[in-house]
Amino acid sequence: MSTPIHDKNQQLQYIKQRLHLLSTMVDNIDPEEGSESEMKRLEEMVEQLRIKCRQFQPDWKDY
């Protein structure tokens, strides 16, 4: 298990990397040969990113 990221710069870097990976995966899906498993994998990755964003939210609250 990895350690939590509390630094906002590192959090943004993580999100950017994940979005870049997602974008690359979407770009490489062939609409004629794409599979349901590819769509499920993308959905899982989006869900993982959503969860991570929720974990980061407390660090972004205004005090």
Image (cartoon, helix red, strand yellow):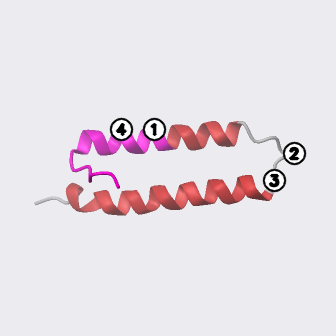
Amino acid type assigned to the residue bearing label 2 in the image: Glu
Q: Which residue is mark 1?
A: 17
Which residues lie in the magenta part? Answer: 1-18
Q: Which residue is mark 2?
A: 33
Asked if residue 12 lies left or right of residue 24, the reply is: left
Q: Residue at position x 28%, y 40% from top? A: 10
Precedes in sequence: disc 2 or disc 1: 1
Tell me the crowding category of disc 3: few under 14, some 14 to 19, or many 20 or more residues within 10 angstroms, Cα based.
few
Precedes in sequence: disc 4 or disc 3: 4
Residue 15 vertical position relative to residue 45 in the rendered view, above or below = above
Residue 3 vertical position relative to residue 12 in the rendered view, above or below = below
Q: CA distance from mark 2 to mark 1?
A: 26 Å
Does the stretch in magenta take in 42? no
Q: CA distance from mark 4 to mark 2?
A: 32 Å
Residue 37: percent from left, percent from top: 74, 57
Amino acid type assigned to the residue bearing label 1 in the image: Gln
Residue 1: percent from left, percent from top: 35, 55
Which labelled disc corresponds to residue 35? 3
Q: CA distance from mark 2 to mark 3?
A: 6 Å
Q: Residue at position x 10%, y 60% from top? A: 63
Q: Residue at position x 43%, y 39% from top? A: 16
| Tags 4 and 2 touching, CB below 8 Å | no
Report the residue that reaches farthest toward the right: 32
Q: Residue at position x 58%, y 44% from top? A: 22
Asked if residue 47 lies left or right of residue 4, the reply is: right
Q: Which residue is mark 4?
A: 13
Precedes in sequence: disc 4 or disc 2: 4
